[in-house]
Amino acid sequence: MTPSTGPPLPGGRPWDVVVIGGGNAGLVAAITARQHARRVLVVERAQALMRGGNTRHTRNIRCVHSRADEFTGPYPFDELWRDLCGIGTGPSNEKLAELTVRESETIPGWMSRHGVRWQRPLAGTLQLGRTNRFFLGGGKALVNTYHRAAAQLGIAVCNGTTVEDLVMDGDRCRGLVTGSGVIGARAVVCASGGFEADIDWLRRYWGDAADNFLIRGSRDNDGRVIAALYAHGAARAGEERGFHAVAIDARSPRFDGGIATRLDSIPFGIVVNSDGRRFYDEGEEIWPKRYAIWGRNIAEQPGQIAYSLWDAKVRRLFLPPMYQPAEAGSIGELAGMLDLDARAVAATVAGFNASIRPGGAFNPAVLDDCATEGITPPKSHWAQPIDTPPYYGVAMRPGITFTYLGVAVTEQARVLRTDGTTFANVYAAGEIMSGNILSTGYLAGFGLTIGSVWGRIAGAEASRGAHDG
């Protein structure tokens, strides 16, 4: 069989396994399925240039490991499990979350065997060198590497093809409806992402606030496959308002801004809303555990906008913003540049400066003892007076990476139905089923972990399911 890049002809002999989605989860599923299935097809909605979905914007994976290797130290199961339980409201399904954490230890070796190369982490705000492993070239290189591996295995890839619906025969999927016809399938893996690019769908849960959300990831992730699965009786998993969202520059593009538009200045200054007031603890926890709460924090503020403010003495402690920040010689001047009330912002800064507990030793690498006293909200760590000009500021919006509401699955990645049974040959992996594991919080690098672990499970199970049909 010769790998393909064009739309397949409708009809003909069914594929053993068809994978919907060509990001990390889908490609891992396809490569795994090919070990036991002869005819495997990946249906990718994007054209080849933009293939890979949100995976294009990744750069590292979080996983259990017992030795340094490309890491700076060990990260045992118990610690990753505690970290996962400590974000948001904890795992949605502890059994599936525990499986994800346990299997994460095997993922780097699998990636290496399929061509992924690694690099030492750089020092930076996220401090991920011990917990996360960085792949050389980032997400685009990862996608290209997996495509080369897929081609060598004879896996067919169909770019620029949108799956509109599933052809169901009772509990069994017989094919996928696309613009060019029906693709026959003996087993199907759904790895098509969330619905974050469908603003109308977000508006169901967030109201008009959704109009101010920016989407860091692919504009193709509009939940079309999720909706089709729901229509055919798939059970839901995840929070309706659950998503991985971070603070990004308000000047970012509406879609596909990716990792470059994220702002890492928050722990080193203060954040105010459009009234010039602080509203959350900027130093609550180390940044990898708390950076992803700031999208929701801002989403709940008036106008879904907030402003990160800092001064000259911390400006080199984090990655600079992609776009030039506002810069001024005084807090009042900076507020005016950001269209904020100068008196309100000056009062907030003065109150914050006066509340800082004396004697703390500032250390950006750990949870230091620089904190505030007698102010609400507090700043628990890294609290320093904002008193050294020039002063800097950036307007921020919620930047959604992916949504958590999706389909419920079993330990075998089978998609559950609302009646408690499963589809006979439909599986799911990646963001489309992340709500089984994530609730309201996020750990840096863990989305790729979910996609990799469940891509392997879904691919292996689908290849077996293909023979059952």
Image (tube, rainbow, N blue to C red):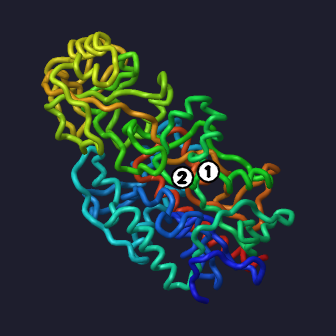
Residue 335, given in percent of the width and then of the height, sits at 28, 20
Tell which of 312 and 445 is nearer to you.
312
Q: Is 196 in front, or is 112?
A: 196
Residue 421 bears which disc, if any?
none
In this rendering, position of residue 84 left or right of residue 37: left
Q: Residue at x 57, y 47 (%)?
A: 197
Determine the image quadrant of residue 163: bottom right
Compared with 225, 7 (above or below) is: below
Q: How far across and down, in percent of the image, does residue 222 sit?
A: 61, 51
Q: Amino acid at mark 2?
A: Arg
Q: Is residue 218 above or below residue 177?
A: above
Q: CA–CA distance between discs 1 and 2?
A: 7 Å
Q: Horizontal placement of 90 versus 234: left or right? A: left
Pointer 1 residue: 222
Quadrant of image for the N terminus: bottom right
Amino acid type, residue under disc 1 in the picture: Asp
Mark 2 residue element: loop
Whole-percent x, y for residue 372 in the image: 26, 19
The secondary structure type at the circle numbered 1 is loop
Q: Dot 2 corresponds to which residue? A: 219
